[in-house]
Amino acid sequence: MTMEFKELDVRPILRDGGEPFEEIMKAVAGLQEGQGLRLLAPFRPQPLFRVMDSKGFDHDVVELEGGHFEVRFTPRMEEAVAVSENAISPALWPEPAVQLDLSDLPPPEPMQQILAAAEGLEAGKVIFAVLSREPIFLFPELTRRGHQWVGNYDQGGTAYRIMIRVGSGGRNA
């Protein structure tokens, strides 16, 4: 799918002694979902990069003839995160005690290794694993055993990342 861009040329505003920030923010507010902003400026608008980053935009800069710049601000796609129904405050979980790269293993080996790792850990410990696909059969088994989990695909969509907080099914529970 090709990204559609709304264009804003701030060079005339600056040439006339004006400040373009308000016009830029109006343009950003008027963007449709999934639409980017193509900004034309007589200089590299470095301070704007942080502002746009905080609004969820990445940027690409191209220097044009005469020292002018084209900056394409593209909205970051939000990563869909799957969360178990019993997950409590995943953002507050401790750092993973175990990290597993299982991306080269065929099913059911990743599931077996994750469950074995969970059985060997104390309740509250966290496992981080990278898999080649979404582990749809693992999710209900983790929940059945009292473990919490959150997971999503990486930004490129090539690997599935999952964090599991060991529950009462782990050692010394």
Image (cartoon, rainbow, N blue to C red):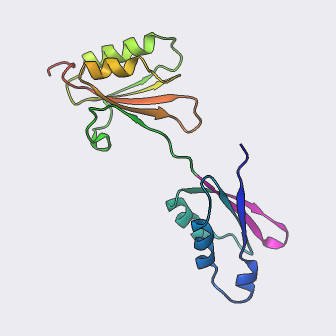
Question: Which of the 4 quarters of the picture holds residue 36?
Answer: bottom right
63 to 170, vertically: above or below = below
Q: Main secondary structure of the magenta part?
A: strand
Identify which residue is drawn at 59% across, 69% down.
Answer: 48
Rendered position, 99 above or below 35: above
Residue 63 belongs to the span the image colors magenta? yes
The answer to which image quadrant residue 122 occupies is top left
Relative image position of residue 150 (x, y in whole percent): 37, 33
Q: Nearer the viewer, residue 79 or 100?
A: 79
- Front residue of this view, candidates 47 and 30: 30
In which quarter of the view is residue 23 placed? bottom right
Residue positioned 24% across, 21% down in the render = 121
Span of residues in magenta: 59-75
Q: Residue furthest bottom?
A: 17
Q: Position of residue 75 (x, y in %)?
A: 59, 54
Residue sitting at 61 percent across and 66 percent down?
30
Which x, y percent locates residue 11? 75, 78
Quadrant the N terminus occupies: top right
Residue 82 versus residue 20: which sits nearer the camera? 82
Could you tell whether 35 is left or right of 79 in the image?
Answer: right
| Coordinates of residue 82 in the picture (x, y in percent) | 41, 34
